[in-house]
Amino acid sequence: MYLLGNLKLTGNDRKMKQESQFAPPLPYLDVADPGFSIRSAAVAAAREASWVARTNYGLAVLRYDDVQKMLRHPKLRQGSYRWPALNDVTGDFARWWESMLLSQEGDNHARLRRMANPAFSPKLITSLAPKFTELANMLIDDFAPKGKCDFIAEFTEPYATGVICELLGLPFERWRELADIAGDMGLALGVTFKKDLPTIEAATQRLFSYVEDLVAFRRANPKDDFIGMLINANEDKSQLSDQELMDMIVLAIFGGIDTTRNQLGLAMSTFIEHPDQWALLAEKPELARAAVEEVMRVRPTVTWVTREATEDFTYNDTLIEKGTTLHLFSQSATSDPRVFEDPSFDITAERKPHFGFGGGTHHCLGHFIARGDMTEALKLLAQRVKNPRFDGEVEWLPDSGNTGAIRMPIAFDPA
Amino acid sequence: MKVHVNIDICLLHGQCVIAAPEIFSFDDNGDLVWVAEIDDSQVADAEAASDACPEQAIIIG
């Protein structure tokens, strides 16, 4: 047996065991370094050398087929519940993160998921498409005459937040407050979690206090929507406890804002680097849905999906010990040359599914909304924001964890 | 009512198994199995499963 930290290579016969004793060590990726890039040559080289690399947190799975299998492997559970512990962090964010829907398994998870599903159904989301278009047009109207904007502050933040306000029946006038909170809380999902903890804790407390007020208001002014349904369910505490009620609303607000804001910014930067594709989208707006999928394939905000081994098991002749954290590298998998012969950005290409929404039991609950609102946004932006280019320095979150731009000054030709 | 799953686009996420465990389940090989003919009392569950499917692979009718 060949031991590497909490990982052992095993062979079925003596010959393999002998060979494995002299096997080259697995590649190592220092993913906790804020300078580390998930899109670096080092990751591509590691992917060529092995299906798996060692990291600061455990293992990184790098190839398409293995990521697809690991997403719903029966010996793995959702693993990011341990993200605060891996960063040696406790507090209000950690308490919420470790107990909300994404961190639950089994019956508890199924109960909460069944409860939340109807609010995110495709039918409901399709009916919201005109609202998405109206919101996008209103935001573009504000900055279009200038021919420039900070694409994050002036479009992706108010847009992602506005969609959530629409879905949850929250007052849009207070969008900036929610966007700021979501942005600050989002720092927890990057590799600088511990350093940013005071900011994250303050934002978490503000959001819980916002949600407390909201629930009190809604109890006094009932409404037949997602929050109304949760409040009704909460009347029977065994169906939905007070804490679960709060945790679920916090998840809906935070989860919806931070990811879409980042993903739309990544879409714009990708198109700025591929101006011919932007022109093509303007010409053929029916490609907008495919454009969303293609952006999420080459530049997902969720750069890894986390799993944890619930027992010892062997995969690809590698023994993975119980408790090992596995990060499934989404971007590395969906640019794997074994599956994507030409992985370059092309919104007209037929592609295998990406992993930008995770997969399996914990597949992103809000993906119909995210897909729907980003489709409508890209369709309109391509029509009205011609020849976009960077107009100053783009400020980025670290490239691993949940990534995206914090500030993105762009100039364009209004149309 | 009939339940049809387009296995070509199904990615085995298992959201249908969560939404309607009486109708959908995984067998020992990890393959999806389902009740192909349902009665009226199961239609709402089947529709919830169809709505929850990320790949929209389930057709009821």
Image (cartoon, coloured by chain):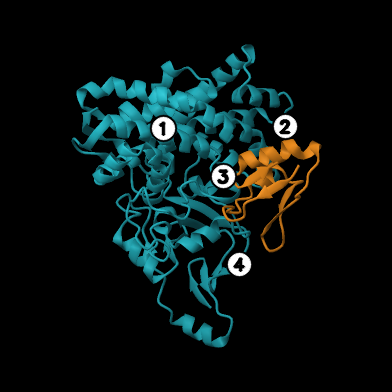
Chain colours: A cyan, B orange
Q: How far apart are marks 1 and 3 (CA)?
A: 19 Å
Whether residue A200 appears in this view of the structure is no
Q: Are the residues tagged 4 and 1 within 8 Å (C-beta)?
A: no
The chain holding disc 4 is A
* Chain letter of disc 3 in the image: B
Left or right of A230 on screen, residue A272? left
Number of the front mark, 2 or 3? 3
Read off the residue under disc 2. Answer: A239
Residue picked out by circle 1: A376
Packing grade of label 1 (10 A; few <14, some 14-19, many >=20) is many
Label 4 vs label 3: CA separation? 28 Å
Q: Which callout, 4 or 1, points at the residue further toward the start of the chain?
A: 4
Residue at the disc numbered 4: A313
Q: Is mark 3 on a helix, strand or loop?
A: loop
| Residue for badge 3 | B54
Local SS, label 4 = strand
